[in-house]
Image (cartoon, rainbow, N blue to C red):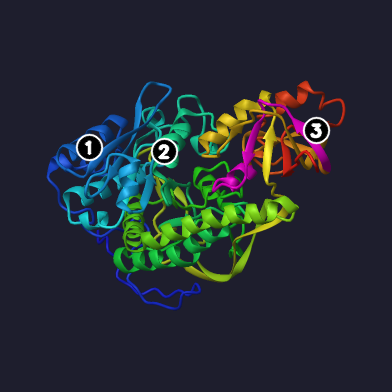
């Protein structure tokens, strides 16, 4: 069967018209992954893409690279609940073995992650291939201007918790860790050793300027080989998001089309109950405007993020190819523009601190606690009217019914691109927060988020505002129970806090992270995740109005004020 479709396909998505040979459906170019000695083949390649790598397969493959390259350092990240040692691979030329050496090199650090959800294994396999290309092939120049930290398997326990799959690979891991938790919902509440280790060992110490997270989704009807997103929380600094959206995404997309001949676009969906599509929406693609996703939360640190999702219906080989293409062109871009990206991030740090110092004391500094997606305008969408699942004849293995999602998709004009994040509700961003000593466990989490916290050595008097709670309630959202409050902020002229209380000075680069975690009105901050429920119940929230225990101060009051 001819796997290469030769044709011309034109599309206009605000980037101009073009003509290009494109691979559709399950198509990939011949020998796209190169020719390697058997010892350097991944489990997916050895099995002709019927299997994916176990955690021990990943360890053995990385160990092989390490023994044959001088540019590798292994960074241990965490110990899983089942005792596996999760690790990341630091690639650099010359080799660096510590964050200090990385900083002294002056090179930006890029972090890439796969297998947070082991059933979505294509990112893991692509990252192994990319490491091989860099260390043993012709891509070593990708270490000229950057340091790469790659964690191909972020969920080792889930990877080895195997069950049967209807397609390929035939055996897949669990989407949760050994605690039964979804790691990509733990970015704020920090309940898993994997996410805590990621923060403590990688993000806080190595300070990557860009975080890449590889995913896959279920069967869909759009025509893109991969969808991409960046952090969209209105609470986060928009500068890093806008750079990724306006500069990085278009260039990477264009280069993938030119060099790998596949189409990529925003990680969105439409309501497939209706044809033709009218809205191409982040929200319908389950990219909700909440901090729980690791690639969303990292944007609160004034850093850049990229999340990609491969459609679930193409073959496993095609899905790996799409991830491989995206990772390659992303690293080509960061290798050329990493210094520029690093400067933008560090400038955002500095400007945030300056804004807090200049405006917070007056109560004039605001930030968003909630938002929504609006339209960027109308686009032309690649979509199939049908994408039908059927069993391979004589088997119990699912495939896409021939003729329903192969070849060039339809071009649907006038579709609203609902992916523009817009803040809808504001709150005052204080000069600082003060927490009582009994909530020290929250400050432990803030420190894992790289928020600086100090313990008061003596009493302090401040003026500011506090949130008066009239009612606490709970809602069900995406399988989680979240806390919500009815109440309002009230000004407080003076309030004294004893020694032993915790103070968070917001004149720090992680101010937006602290704000998102501590504000009572963010959808999934500490309050939203129920971390303060027990305390609030102990002070009678179910019987009367009570005061939210996190105080927002604007000014420290001296003795003569």
Label 1: few (<14), some or many (≥20) within 10 Å? some
Tags 2 and 1 in contact by the CB under 8 Å rule?
Answer: no
Residue sitting at x 37%, y 60%:
339
Does residue 288 appear left or right of residue 488 in this picture?
Answer: left
- Judge whether residue 504 is colored magenta: yes
Label 2 residue SS: loop
Q: Which residue is mark 1?
A: 61
User: Could you say where residue 61 lies in the image, as x and y percent from the top left?
Assistant: 22, 37
Horizontal placement of 501 versus 119: left or right? right
- Mark 1–mark 3 Cα distance, whole angstroms, equals 55 Å
Q: Which residue is mark 2?
A: 119
Magenta region: 491-516
The residue at the far bottom in this view is 17
Q: Give the vertical position of 47 relative to 456 (above or below).
A: below
Q: Using the image, tell me which numbered label, if any, was put on residue 547.
A: 3
Nearest the viewer among 278 and 5 is: 278
Rate crowding at label 2 as few (under 14), some (14 to 19) or many (20 or more) other CA atoms within 10 Å.
Answer: many
- Left or right, 285 with respect to 484, comes to left
Q: CA distance from mark 2 to mark 1?
A: 20 Å
Q: Quadrant of the N terminus?
A: bottom left
Q: Quadrant of the C terminus?
A: top right
Instruction: Work out how far the residue at label 2 is from the one at label 3, CA to CA, in angstroms.
Output: 44 Å
- N-terminal-most mark, 1 or 3: 1
Sequence-wise first label, 2 or 1: 1
Q: Secondary structure at mark 1?
A: helix
Is residue 517 visible in the rendered image? The answer is yes
Residue 175 appears in the picture as rendered: no
Residue 140 in picture, x, y percent from top left? 21, 54
Mark linked to residue 21: none
């Amino acid at each position: 069967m001819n796997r290469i479709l030769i044709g011309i396909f034109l599309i206009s998505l605000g980037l101009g018209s073009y003509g290009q040979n494109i691979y559709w459906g399950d198509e990939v170019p011949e020998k796209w992954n190169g020719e390697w000695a058997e010892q350097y083949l991944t489990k997916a390649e050895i099995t002709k893409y019927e299997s994916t790598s176990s955690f021990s397969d990943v360890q053995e493959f990385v160990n092989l690279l390490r023994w044959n390259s001088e540019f590798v350092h292994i960074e241990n990240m965490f110990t899983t609940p089942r005792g596996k040692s999760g690790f990341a691979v630091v690639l650099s030329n010359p080799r660096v073995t510590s964050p200090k050496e990385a900083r002294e090199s002056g090179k930006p650090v890029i972090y890439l992650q796969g297998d947070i959800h082991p059933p979505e294994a294509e990112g893991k396999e692509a990252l192994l291939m990319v490491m091989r290309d860099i260390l043993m092939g012709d891509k070593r120049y990708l270490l000229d201007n950057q340091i790469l930290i790659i964690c191909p398997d972020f969920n080792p326990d889930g990877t080895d918790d195997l069950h049967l799959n209807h397609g390929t690979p035939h055996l897949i891991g669990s989407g949760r860790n050994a605690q039964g938790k979804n790691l990509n919902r733990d970015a704020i509440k920090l309940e898993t050793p994997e996410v805590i280790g990621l923060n403590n060992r990688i993000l806080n110490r190595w300070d990557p300027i860009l975080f890449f997270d590889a995913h896959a989704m279920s069967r869909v009807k759009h025509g893109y080989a991969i969808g991409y997103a960046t952090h969209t929380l209105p609470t986060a600094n928009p500068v890093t998001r806008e750079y990724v959206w306006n500069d990085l995404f278009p260039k990477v997309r264009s280069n993938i089309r030119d060099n790998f001949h596949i189409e990529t676009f925003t990680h969105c969906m439409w309501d497939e109950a209706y044809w033709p599509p009218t809205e191409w929406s982040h929200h319908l693609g389950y990219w909700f405007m909440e901090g729980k996703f690791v690639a969303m939360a990292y944007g609160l640190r004034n850093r850049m993020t990229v999340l990609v999702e491969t459609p679930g219906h193409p073959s496993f080989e095609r899905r790996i190819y799409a991830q491989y293409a995206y990772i390659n062109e992303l690293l080509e871009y960061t290798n050329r523009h990493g210094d520029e990206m690093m400067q933008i991030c560090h400038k955002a740090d500095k400007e945030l601190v300056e804004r807090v110092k200049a405006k917070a004391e007056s109560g004039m500094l605001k930030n968003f606690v909630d938002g929504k997606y609006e339209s960027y305008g109308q686009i032309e969408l690649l979509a199939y009217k049908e994408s039908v699942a059927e069993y391979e004849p004589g088997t119990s293995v699912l495939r896409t019914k021939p003729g329903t999602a192969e070849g060039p998709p339809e071009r649907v004009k006038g579709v609203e691109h609902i992916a523009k994040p817009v803040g809808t509700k504001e709150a005052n961003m204080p000069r600082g927060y003060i927490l009582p000593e009994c909530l020290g466990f929250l400050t432990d989490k803030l420190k894992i988020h790289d928020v600086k916290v100090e313990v008061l050595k003596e009493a302090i008097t401040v003026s500011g505002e506090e949130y008066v709670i009239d009612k606490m309630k709970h809602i069900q959202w995406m399988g989680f129970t979240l806390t919500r409050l009815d109440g309002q902020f009230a000004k407080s002229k003076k309030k004294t806090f004893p020694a032993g209380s915790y103070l968070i000075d917001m004149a720090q680069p992680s101010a937006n992270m602290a704000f998102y975690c501590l504000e009572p009105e963010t959808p999934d901050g500490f309050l939203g995740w129920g971390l303060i429920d027990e305390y609030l119940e102990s002070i009678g929230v179910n019987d009367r109005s009570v005061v939210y225990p996190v105080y927002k101060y604007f000014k420290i009051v001296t003795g003569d004020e």
